[in-house]
Image: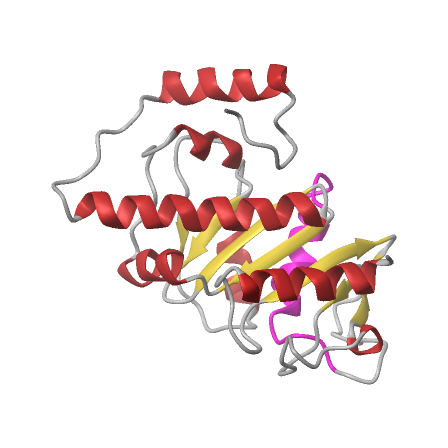
Amino acid sequence: MGHREDIIAACKALEADGLNRGASGNVSVRDGDHMLITPSAVGYDVIEPEMIARMSLADDSGAWEGPNKPSSEWRFHRDILRARPDFNAVVHTHAPYATILAIARKPIPAVHYMIAAFGGPDIRVCDYARYGTADLSAHILAAMDGRNGCLMANHGMVVGASDLTRALWLAGELEALAHQYVHTLAVGGPVLLSDAEIEETARGFASYGVQSKDSTE
């Protein structure tokens, strides 16, 4: 499959897994010096390859190629791909538990060793700004400094990765961590892992080759 078909498959997977519904969320993939991104206000059940918008990563005008305009969140997708050459795919979702914590503006601490997959001992919450704005993009970039994902205040979550398969996996892992954290708060709060324990896990991931979507167990 080409990138366009991969994006559609990713959208359908996100919906099937309960991470997005209808036309919520968006997906982008680096395409040379351009990006391909899901169109605005098109349901995942009717999206077609030709509807995927193509945009120059260097162009600040918001111009696009294609019959459908890009997602209203194109700016932060573009800015993440610009700022992070290690990323070739970005996934944004309104997954339920991640969004609960985003609304409460609670970062996710080291409740489980899998948080190491995000580059550190926590998943930050970026400051709030209206969707589609340059301010929101700047807030996301700050929260993702040294991280592979963040929560977006009163909005949802975003992750980035070297390829779309791993970005989808990270989106699922972030929602799993959010689910675990919300429920531990209900039973008295979690016992957190130390920074040293998370660093040890990260080293284990590197030697295990778990920078794929495979389980570490």
Q: Where residue 114 sits in the image (x, y, percent)? A: 45, 32
Q: Residue at x 55, y 45 (%)?
A: 170
Image coords of residue 206 (percent x, y):
61, 19
Q: Is residue 147 visible?
A: yes
Residue at 38 percent of width and 62 percent of height:
96
Q: Is residue 86 magenta?
A: yes
Quarter of the picture holding the N terminus: bottom right
Q: Is residue 148 above or below residue 26?
A: above
Residue 16 counted in the magenta span: no
- Residue sitting at the far left: 188
Q: What residue do we see at 68% from left, 47% from top?
A: 165
Whether 195 is drawn above or below 169: the answer is above
| Display colour scheme | secondary structure
Residue 35 visible somewhere in the drawing? no
Residue 76 position within the rendered picture, expressed as x and y whole percent measured from the top left: 61, 61
**Residue under the image location 66 percent in, 57 percent down:** 79
Q: Is residue 36 left or right of residue 93?
A: right
Q: Position of residue 180 (x, y in %)?
A: 31, 44
Stretch in magenta: 69-87
